[in-house]
Image (tube, grey):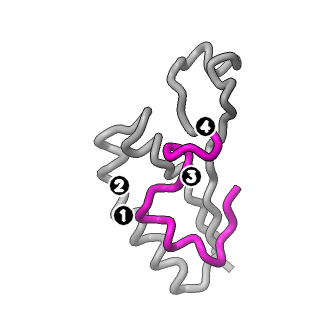
């Protein structure tokens, strides 16, 4: 069985707090790849960067003082284009 790992395709990394035009530009390709692999029966795993509300107090937060991917916020969620594709997948 094939495995596809989709890494941190979250709102804050695509078009949110740390988003970039380059990240936005790959969305269609990522969505198409996930659809293709699902049709083939591949296992799909989505990773999600996750921080807590004390992010700015952490070592990472002191070096990158931009709140992002705070658990349960809009920026923490997978981009809307991928959400419908998460059935029968693993999110870690």
| Residues at discs 4 and 1 in contact (Cβ within 8 Å) | no
Badge number at residue 26 = 2
> How many C-alpha atoms fall within 10 Å of the one at disc 2: few (<14), some, or many (≥20)?
few
- The CA distance from mark 4 to mark 3 is 16 Å
Q: Which residue is mark 1?
A: 29
Q: Say which label, 4 or 1, has the lower sequence index.
A: 1
| Residues at discs 2 and 1 in contact (Cβ within 8 Å) | yes
Q: Residue at x 51, y 86 (%)?
A: 39
Looking at this view, is 73 or 2 the one in front? 73
30 on left or right of 76: left
> How many C-alpha atoms fall within 10 Å of the one at disc 3: few (<14), some, or many (≥20)?
few
Badge number at residue 7 = 3
Looking at this view, is 44 or 1 the one in front? 44
What span is in magenta?
71-92
- The CA distance from mark 1 to mark 3 is 14 Å
Residue 80 lies in the magenta-colored region: yes
| Residues at discs 3 and 2 in contact (Cβ within 8 Å) | no
Name the element at disc 3.
strand
Which of labels 2 and 4 is toward the front?
Answer: 4
Q: Which residue is mark 4?
A: 70
Name the element at disc 2.
loop
- Which quadrant of the figure has residue 70? top right
Name the element at disc 4.
loop
Quarter of the image for the C terminus: give it: bottom right
The answer to whether 7 is drawn above or below residue 75 in the figure is below
Where is residue 8 shown, x and y percent of the image?
A: 55, 49
Where is residue 2 shown, x and y percent of the image?
A: 64, 75
Badge number at residue 15 = none
């Amino acid at each position: 069985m094939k495995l596809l790992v989709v890494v941190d395709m979250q709102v804050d990394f695509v078009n949110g707090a740390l988003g970039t035009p380059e990240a936005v530009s790959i969305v269609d390709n990522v969505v198409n790849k996930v659809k293709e692999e699902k049709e083939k029966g591949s296992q799909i795993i989505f990773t999600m960067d996750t921080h807590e509300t004390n992010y700015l107090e952490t070592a990472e937060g002191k070096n990158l003082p931009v709140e992002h991917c705070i658990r349960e916020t809009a920026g923490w969620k997978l981009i809307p284009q991928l959400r419908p594709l998460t059935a029968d997948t693993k999110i870690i």
